[in-house]
Amino acid sequence: MRAVDAAHQILQESGQPMPVHDLLDEVAKRVGQDPDARTLAVIYSDINLDVRFTYRADGLWALRDWATKAGHTGGAAGRDHPARVEESDDAEEEDGW
């Protein structure tokens, strides 16, 4: 099982957002990897890039579909950030879209 899939499964089982360090430690344990800094950094990067996850305040990660059901559209670690949305809107206006 890939580490990012283990993270998804862990969050599904918990049913609630988890602190990033707890999630990373549990993922490393579940996939049988040493929880050294390099391994945890790779797992964190994979979670950050996977659209199934969303970053919540105070270092918590959750599943994106939880946020969608609750009416929240925030994205993981900067995705869908208001400044980025505004920039893209401005670019469209300039291009005449």
Image (cartoon, grey):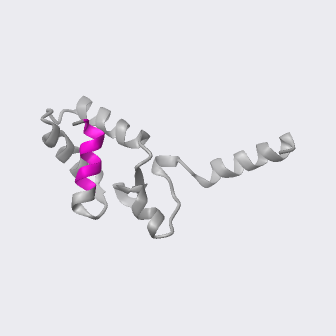
Residue 96, quarter of picture: top right
Q: Where 54 sits versus 36, above or below?
A: below
Residue nearest the viewer, comparing 47 with 77: 47
Q: Is residue 57 left or right of residue 22?
A: right
Q: Is residue 53 left or right of residue 28?
A: right
Name the spot of residue 19 as percent of width and height, x first.
28, 55
Q: Which residues are magenta?
A: 2-11
Residue 37, horizontal then vertical, whole percent? 23, 33
In percent of width and height, residue 12 lies at: 27, 58
Inspect the magenta stretch and tell me whether residue 5 lies in it: yes
> Which of 2/82 is in front?
2
Instruction: Give the residue drawn at x 31%, y 32%.
Output: 42
Seen in the picture, residue 29 relative to 71 is either above or below; the reply is above
Left or right: residue 60 compared with residue 13: right
Asked whether residue 44 is drawn in magenta, I would say no
Q: Residue at x 28, y 42 (%)?
A: 5
Name the residue located 27 percent from the left edge and 64 percent from the top edge: 15
Q: Is residue 78 above or below residue 40?
A: below
